[in-house]
Amino acid sequence: MKKLILSSVLMGIAVCAQATAELPAAIKAKGEIVAAIKPNYPPMDFRDPATNELTGFDYDLGTALAERLGVKIKWQETSFEQMISALTTKRVDIILSGMTDTKERQKAITFVDYFVSGPQFYTLQSRTDLNETTDLCGKKVGTSRATTWPDEIAEWSKANCEAAGKPAVVVMGSEGSADARTQLRQRRIDAAMQGSETLPYIMSLDKNSLKTLGHAISTQFTGLGVSNANPELTKAVAEALQSMIADGSYHAILKKWDLEKGAVERVTINGQ
């Protein structure tokens, strides 16, 4: 009986794995899907310090996704600012690099949402004067200017600082999250913000150095980007990812990177 049950489960997984939409002919013909990545956002995307090889949640997910679609994946390192341009000019087929799904970005690309997280404040443990998020009123907070976070901090400041008669948070744009952390350690800023999914990993590398303040100030989808002009690829990717959720392979990758809290149970397109 156990063998029959196991056989049924395996058959179900196989059917699920095959029940995906057809890839566009151009991608099938070249046998690979080209993905833009910026490996500076661990544990989502980074280079292993020991080997300098690409690794991270997005890397593992993309590799498994390509296999599910029956092609290889070719990673193309691209600056975050150039990713959408690279996609719309067909230099890459997808963006898989921890990109937040926003209405503004949806004007150019379609997001296949596969993860949930949010922006969170953090600071040095030695800053005993900063223990609550509202302690940041009037302080300098750094964050990547390539993200939506500068605007989100400004909106949060209006609601939580200025509305209470306190001075506004001073938003300091940085070249990226790593740059913001450097500025924080150099005490050029008082605190910083980055995705809640990355902070446990960053804090584990430098124990007793950093601390979080409060919780994520919002919740947002992370999406795999596809050109709006390529709905066929969007459909194929979405169905393949949903099949990975169904058979547990998606959750296994999340568990490897201690990211289960960001799991989605259903793939959405542009948050819908």
Image (cartoon, grey):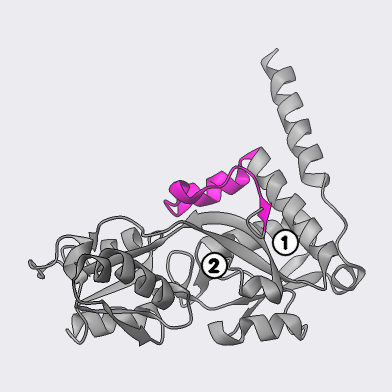
Q: Nearer the viewer, mark 2 or mark 1?
A: 2
User: Which circle marks residue 85 in the picture?
Assistant: none
Question: Residue 4, located in which quarter of the rendered image?
Answer: top right
Which kind of residue does numbered mark 2 sit on? Answer: Thr
Q: Which residue reaches farthest top?
A: 1
Residue 128 visible, this orientation = yes
* 145, 161: nearer the viewer: 161
Picture coordinates of residue 46 (x, y %)? Answer: 47, 73
**Over which residues does the magenta segment extend?**
247-269
Picture coordinates of residue 252 (x, y %)? Answer: 54, 45
Label 2 Cα crowd, 10 Å radius (few <14 / some 14-19 / many 20+): many
Q: Secondary structure at mark 1?
A: helix
Q: Secondary structure at mark 2?
A: loop
Give yes or no for residue 255 being in the magenta stretch: yes
User: Which circle marks residue 100 in the picture?
Assistant: 2
Identified at 38% across, 77% down, the residue is 177
Q: Is residue 9 above or below residue 136?
A: above
Q: Return the residue at label 1.
A: 66
Question: Residue 13, located in which quarter of the rendered image?
Answer: top right
The reply to whether discs 2 and 1 touch (Cβ–Cβ < 8 Å) is no
Q: Is residue 133 left or right of residue 36?
A: left
Give yes or no for residue 271 being in the magenta stretch: no
Q: Is residue 252 left or right of residue 91?
A: left
Q: Earlier in the sequence, mark 2 or mark 1?
A: 1
Which kind of residue does numbered mark 1 sit on? Answer: Ala
Q: Is residue 48 above or below residue 240?
A: below
Identified at 69% across, 24% down, the residue is 6
